Image (cartoon, rainbow, N blue to C red):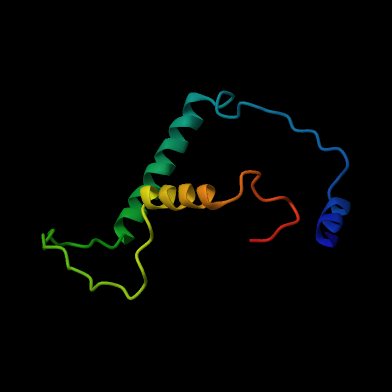
């Protein structure tokens, strides 16, 4: 909580955000220069990129050994357990103060 207060104190109370269309204000020559620069950056990254060569190998799935953990009950089993519990409870059900 103290961190939030500190951040709130550091931020200005009013901050005006103005949206501008910077690309729309550029001339055609400036846009072309930007496109060329971006193309050069992409080409430089492509030269330094690591290429992994290989081919896909299809295998059969590995069977995992059964776990020691008991299997989770299915939805149908859970519904049966719930129905058995509700049938065995008194007609009024549990009151708020009673424990199981």
Residue 69 screen position, x and y as percent: 36, 72
Residue at the image position 40 percent from the left and 39 percent from the top: 36
Taking the image as shown, residue 38 lies to the left or right of residue 55, namely right
Tell whether 40 sits left or right of 52. right
Along the viewing direction, whichever of 56 and 34 lies nearer the viewer = 56
Q: Quadrant of residue 6?
A: bottom right
Side of 34 relative to 39 (left or right): right
Residue 23 vertical position relative to residue 37 in the rendered view, above or below: above
Nearer the observer, 58 or 23 = 58
Q: Which quarter of the image is occupied by the C terminus? A: bottom right
Number of residue marks? 0
Residue projecting furthest to the front: 91
Q: Residue furthest bottom?
A: 68
Give the vertical position of 94 relative to 67 (above or below): above
In the image, what residue occupies the spot 17% across and 68% down? 62
Give the quadrant of residue 5: bottom right
Residue drawn 43% across and 43% down? 37
Question: 75 or 66, which lies in front?
Answer: 75
Residue 13 image offset from top left, x and y in percent:
88, 42
Quarter of the N terminus within the rendering = bottom right
- Of residue 64 and residue 19, the one placed in the foreground of this image is 64
Q: Residue at x 85, y 61 (%)?
A: 2
Q: Position of residue 40 (x, y in %)?
A: 38, 47
């Amino acid at each position: 909580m103290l961190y939030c207060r500190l951040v709130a104190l550091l931020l200005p109370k009013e901050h005006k955000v103005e949206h501008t269309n910077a690309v729309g204000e550029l001339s055609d020559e400036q846009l072309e220069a930007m496109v060329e620069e971006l193309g050069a950056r992409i080409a430089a990254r492509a030269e330094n990129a690591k290429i992994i060569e290989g081919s896909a190998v299809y295998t059969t799935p590995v069977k995992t050994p059964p776990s020691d953990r008991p299997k989770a009950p299915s939805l149908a089993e859970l519904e049966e357990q719930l129905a058995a519990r509700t049938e065995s409870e008194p007609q009024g059900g549990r009151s708020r103060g009673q424990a199981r």
